[in-house]
Amino acid sequence: MTSEDPVRRGGGREAQRRRTRKAIVDAAVRLSAGGATPSIDEIAAAADVSRRTVYAYFPSLDHLLIDATAGALNEPPVEQALADPSISDDPAARVDALIRTLLTYSPQSLPLGRRLIRLTVDQPAGETAEPAGPRRGPRRIEWLEQACEPLRGTLSQESYQRLISALTIVVGWEAQIALRDVRGLGPEAEEEAITWAARALVETAIREHEAE
C-alpha cells in the first residue's frame, strides 16, 4: 500500500479549508440579507461549524461581515465576466476582464477593502488558530487562477504559481490604494496602470515559457 502524495494531501487540506471558509461567509451573507446583524453563534450554526472554527478563520465579527459583504458585491459580476466564452482561451483578456469588473464595483467595495486591510494589519500575530497561514481569504487568488486557467497546462507549476503571486500584487485593493493615495491617480489612469502591469506579467510569463 503506497503512502499518499504529500502535495496532494496538502492540496486536499487547502480545498477543505476553502470550503469551510466559504460556508461561513455564505452563512453570514444569508443571515445579513434581511438587514439584521447576525451573531457569531448564529453564523456558526447556519454554517454547521463550531464557534471556535469561525474564529479560526475570522478574528472578529466585523472582519467576517466586511469580507462577506465584499464577496456578495463582487462575486456575481466577476463570475459572469470570467464565464464569457469569447475570452475563454485568452488569459490576458481574462485578466483584463477581471480587473475591469473589480474596478467597476470599486466605489462600493474599496471602502470595505480599506476597513478589511486595517483589520488584517492590526491583527496581532498569533491571534488566530493558524497564524502561519494567510490572514485574508482566498477569493482574489481563486479569481486570478480562474482568469489564468488557460495557462495552467502550459506553464510549469512553479511559473504558474509565480505568475499568480505577481498578479496578486497588482490586482486588488492594495494596488488601488497605492495608486490613489501615493500616485494621486484618478479612476481612468488607475485602470490603465493596473491593466498594463497585469498584462505585462502575463505576457512575460508566456514569453519565458516559449523561450525555454
Image (cartoon, rainbow, N blue to C red):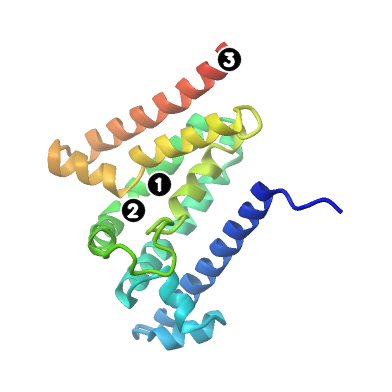
**Whole-number angstrom distance, CA of label 2 to CA of label 1:** 7 Å
Q: Does residue 177 appear in the picture of this structure?
A: yes
Query: Which mark, residue 105?
Result: 2
Image quadrant occupied by the C terminus: top right
Q: Nearer the viewer, residue 61 or 1?
A: 1
Q: Which residue type carries mark 1?
A: Thr
Decide: marks 1, 3 in contact (CB < 8 A)?
no
Which circle's residue, 1 or 3, is located before the other in the chain? 1
Question: Which mark is nearer the camera, 1 or 3?
Answer: 3
Query: Which mark, residue 101?
Result: 1
Pointer 3: residues within 10 angstroms few (<14), some, or many (20+)?
A: few
**Whole-number angstrom distance, CA of label 1 to CA of label 3:** 30 Å
Image quadrant occupied by the N terminus: bottom right
Q: Which residue type carries mark 2?
A: Tyr
| Rendering quarter of residue 131 | bottom left
Q: Position of residue 156 (x, y in %)?
A: 60, 28
Q: Position of residue 69 (x, y in %)?
A: 37, 68
Which circle's residue, 2 or 3, is located before the other in the chain? 2
Residue that label 3 marks: 210
Kindly identify the residue that appears in the image at 42 percent across and 27 percent down: 201
Q: Does residue 30 appear in the picture of this structure?
A: no
Pointer 2: residues within 10 angstroms few (<14), some, or many (20+)?
A: some
Q: Which residue type carries mark 3?
A: Glu
Decide: marks 2, 1 in contact (CB < 8 A)?
yes
Pointer 1: residues within 10 angstroms few (<14), some, or many (20+)?
A: some
| 38 displayed left or right of 107 | right
Q: 72 above or below 93?
A: below
Q: Position of residue 70 (x, y in %)?
A: 37, 62
